[in-house]
């Protein structure tokens, strides 16, 4: 029971951090602003992404966009959340990883449903490395995926 509550709490914390950060950006950063936070290495901006990662799907017709960027992700996230909560013998690190992925996914899904776009605002440049513009939901999903990879590689006999 405690593991189930912990999973829900971590999902909600991820969603909350994501939504709070996006709300602050929407209120305090003008669209397309370019604010140098740490020299030219860490930039704060405000971009509305009507597609998925890196703008994929922006030019899809509205019905297909709704199916692929809202409907299918909603179903997948609900199934993943239900299965993660129901699985009593799930490794705690895998449960945490899934909570991050689910929380990040829900955060971006909320934006797509409420605003028709996802607010992205971070840009990192380190030498020749330059990220796309991303948000806290993207960070959550990325942390979750890396944690999933690490745990499954480290514990190859682990059942998911």
Image (spheres, rainbow, N blue to C red):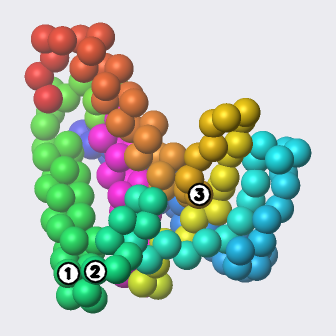
Sequence-wise first label, 1 or 3: 1
Q: Local crowd at mark 3 within 10 Å, few (<14), some, or many (≥20)?
A: many
Q: Residues within 10 Å of mark 1 (few under 14, many from 20)?
A: few
Tell me where the magenta segment starts and ends, as one range. Answer: 96-114
Report the mark closest to the observer, 1 or 2.
2
Residue sticking out furthest to the bottom = 62
Q: Where does residue 128 sit, x and y in percent of width and height?
A: 67, 35
Q: Which mark is on residue 133?
A: 3
Report which quarter residue 77 is drawn in: bottom left
Instruction: Give x and y (percent) for residue 82.
Output: 16, 52
Residue 60's disc number: 2
> Mark 2 or mark 3, which has the lower sequence index?
2
Q: Height in image: 84 above or below 47?
A: above
Question: Residue 70 sits in which quadrant?
Answer: bottom left
Q: Quadrant of the C terminus?
A: top left
Q: Residue furthest front?
A: 128
Q: Is residue 30 above or below residue 140?
A: below
Q: Magenta part mainly helix, strand or loop?
A: helix
Q: Is residue 104 above or below residue 96?
A: below
Q: Disc 1 to disc 2, how far (Cα)?
A: 6 Å
Q: Position of residue 27 (x, y in %)?
A: 73, 79
């Amino acid at each position: 029971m405690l593991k189930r509550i912990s999973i829900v709490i971590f999902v909600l914390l991820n969603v909350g951090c994501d939504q709070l950060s996006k709300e602050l950006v929407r209120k305090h950063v003008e669209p397309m602003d370019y604010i140098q936070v740490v020299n030219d290495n860490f930039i704060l901006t405000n971009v509305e992404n009507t597609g998925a990662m890196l703008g994929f799907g922006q030019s899809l017709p509205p019905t297909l966009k709704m199916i692929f960027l809202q409907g299918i992700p909603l179903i997948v996230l609900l199934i993943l959340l239900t299965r993660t909560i129901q699985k009593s013998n799930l490794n705690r690190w895998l449960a945490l990883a899934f909570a991050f992925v689910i929380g990040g996914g829900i955060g971006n899904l909320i934006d797509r449903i409420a605003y028709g776009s996802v607010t992205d605002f971070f840009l990192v440049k380190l030498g020749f490395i330059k990220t796309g513009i991303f948000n806290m939901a993207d960070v959550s999903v990325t942390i979750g995926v890396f944690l999933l990879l690490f745990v499954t590689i480290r514990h190859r006999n682990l059942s998911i």
